[in-house]
Image: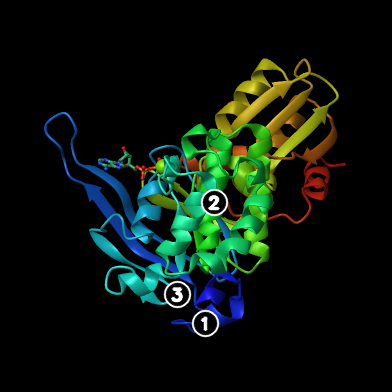
Amino acid sequence: MSNRLQRSPASSAHQGTQAGDPIVQVEGLTKTYPARGRRSPAVTAVQDVTFGVERGELVGLLGPNGAGKTTTIKALCGLVRPDEGRLSVAGHDVERERRRALRHLAAVLEGNRNLYWRLTARENLEYFAGNRGVPRRAVRDRIDELLERFSLGARRNALVSDLSRGMQQKLALAVAVLADTDVVLLDEPTLGLDVETGYEVRGLLRELQSEGRTVIVSTHDMPVVQDLCERTVVIAHGRVLVDDRVDHLLRLFASRAYELELDRPVSDRQEAALRERLVRVTLLDDRKRVQVDLERGDDLYTLIDVLRDGGTLVESIDRRVIDFETVFRRLVRGERAPTPVPHADPLAVAARAAGN
Ligand SMILES: Nc1ncnc2c1ncn2[C@@H]1O[C@H](COP(=O)(O)OP(=O)(O)O)[C@@H](O)[C@H]1O
Ligand SMILES: [Mg+2]
């Protein structure tokens, strides 16, 4: 029993699933919270949410407040009962084989609800280890090691209620890590933390992944996802908007964001024509620099035509660097992940179109 606390990925990794199956599966998750009186009508928190997570992935569940992230995480923990849909962890159905499914999973929910505030940091770890049927003596070393690793050693005997928010969050994470499960779920783990502790928590999540665990982290904080995750499931208004690699999303959106430098200012007539035919036209530097998004394959020709009609010369054209926050805002506003502008080299196309 004691070896449950010594991380041994090989031993627990292949129960219940075939190699290659997603270790976490959410299929068609739908949940409506019933109305509570006239003032609070029924809310459909998630609708047909579907995604899978492969063993060893660190995936971001990203969405604005109210998107349905917590509901999804709670459903995976068996704390919210879906109206529709199937969820499984390590091949076990969360509803029908609840105990087996939950054995593979540890979660840090919002507000550190997995801690006892009137116990000390160390007592919490001892309590939760004991709760999982592990003798205290067997875990003592492991607890000391975790307290050090999470920089909580100096505060090991402080009551949780006396710890800072960041320390509480790290302790909640340590409790989850002690459970030694294949999958760790974290709901908004960096929310309300100071910058430094936020980075520390990110580092700890990376460590979990490098130990071979599967980590799902919900957040509304784009930099967390950009920094931490290879893949993200973006949800808004209870629906999955996109499920893709973070670098892929950045590339797709960047591939249609351009910046042109011109030899003279854009005229009012040109501006009106651009705004009518293209999206997101921004004029900078006394109107001699234009930023545009090219949505359709022929938008670049439109742009060049309008400029050429006014006798304007293009001095340079570049792809604009775009950050994940911009991508996220666009997705949440209802834009679909774009297909790339179908020209391998926009500079060559621009040169051709401009007759250079
Ligand atoms: N227990 C509840 N009763 C009623 N509505 C709820 C409950 N929990 C969440 N909601 C509503 O469901 C929607 C999704 O909430 P939630 O899953 O907490 O989203 P997120 O974690 O992304 O902010 C929100 O509109 C929220 O107000
Ligand atoms: Mg939430």
Give the CA distance from mark 3 to mark 2: 21 Å
Amino acid under label 2?
A: Leu
Q: Position of residue 282 (x, y in %)?
A: 66, 25
Percent x, y of residue 346: 77, 48
Mark 1 lies on a secondary structure that is loop
Q: Which residue is located at x 59 percent, y 65 percent?
A: 57
**Residue 263, x across and y down, in percent:** 86, 24
Q: In the displayed structure, would residue 120 be above or below residue 12? A: above
Name the secondary structure under disc 3: loop
Q: Which mark is residue 90?
A: 3
Q: Amino acid at mark 1?
A: His
Q: Is residue 231 left or right of residue 116?
A: right
Q: Which residue is mark 1?
A: 14
**Which circle marks residue 173 in the picture?**
2
Identify the residue shown where x is 28% and y is 68%. 95
Say which quarter of the image contains residue 307: top right
Q: Within 10 angstroms of label 2, few (less than 14), some, or many (20 or more) residues?
A: many
Mark 2: secondary structure: helix
State left or right for residue 316 relative to residue 302: right
User: In this view of the protein, which residue sits in the foreground, 4 or 110?
Assistant: 4
In the image, what residue type sits under mark 3?
Ala
